[in-house]
Image (cartoon, rainbow, N blue to C red):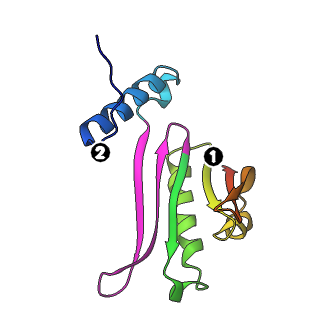
């Protein structure tokens, strides 16, 4: 057998790797947590249907992970970020998640998450040479 290392953009190969890892992980989680995966997308839209912000995450086993949260600059300071966060937290509680995790950079939303009860459990310095990358968690 000859094995080669190949760098390429290939969706089916990409999906194969993700599926194999998912199957491997499934074998190590309790039966009641298997198959608990749900993508979540909540958007802010204006009267014309234009997206003005949103929060994207996923329920994965016993936690919810927030991948992206953004509100258009002209809408900030009106509480929309908090409303989006509370909405996804509600989903986490309804789906019986034990915690929520999120990461943010030092120039992004660290204070916002801390204000809402998230606690830093790790960080990496020298991100983009001048910033820190924070990992936060909120127990439910």
Seen in the picture, residue 33 relative to 132 is either above or below; the reply is above
Where's residue 121, x and y in %? 74, 48
* Element class at badge 2: loop
Q: Please tell me which residue is depicted at 49% across the width and 27% down the height of the picture.
A: 32
Instruction: State which tag comes first along the sequence, 2 or 1.
Output: 2
Seen in the picture, residue 118 relative to 98 is either above or below; the reply is below
Q: Please tell me which residue is depicted at 29% across the width and 45% down the height of the picture.
A: 9
Q: Please tell me which residue is depicted at 53% across the width and 55% down the height of the picture.
A: 66
Residue 41 sits in quarter: bottom left
Residue indicated by mark 2: 9
Residue 103 sits in quarter: bottom right
Where's residue 46, x and y in %? 37, 85
Residue indicated by mark 1: 99
Left or right of 127, for residue 28: left
Left or right of 62, for residue 36: left
Is 61 colored magenta in this rendering? yes
Left or right of 90, for residue 52: left
The crowd level at tag 2 (other Cα within 10 Å; few <14, some 14-19, many 20+) is: few
Where's residue 75, x and y in %? 52, 86
The crowd level at tag 1 (other Cα within 10 Å; few <14, some 14-19, many 20+) is: some
- Mark linked to residue 107: none
Is 48 colored magenta in this rendering? yes
Seen in the picture, residue 126 relative to 78 is either above or below; the reply is above
Mark 2–mark 1 Cα distance, whole angstroms, equals 34 Å
Q: Residue furthest top?
A: 1
* Element class at badge 1: strand
Q: What is the magenta range?
A: 36-63
Image quarter where the N terminus lies is: top left
Q: Please tell me which residue is depicted at 56% across the width and 74% down the height of the picture.
A: 81
Of tags 2 and 1, which is closer to the observer? 2
């Amino acid at each position: 057998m000859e094995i080669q290392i190949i760098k390429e953009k290939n969706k089916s190969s990409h999906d194969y790797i993700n599926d194999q890892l998912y199957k491997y992980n499934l074998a190590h989680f309790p039966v009641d947590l298997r198959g608990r995966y749900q993508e979540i997308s909540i958007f802010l839209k204006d009267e014309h249907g234009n997206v003005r912000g949103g929060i994207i995450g996923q329920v994965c086993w016993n936690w919810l992970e927030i991948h992206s949260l953004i509100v258009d600059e002209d809408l900030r300071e009106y509480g929309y970020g908090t409303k989006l966060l509370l909405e996804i937290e509600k989903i986490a509680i309804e789906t019986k998640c034990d915690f929520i995790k999120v990461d943010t950079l030092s120039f992004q939303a660290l204070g916002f998450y801390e204000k809402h009860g998230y606690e830093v459990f790790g960080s990496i310095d020298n991100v983009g040479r001048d910033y820190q990358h924070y990992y936060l968690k909120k127990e439910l």
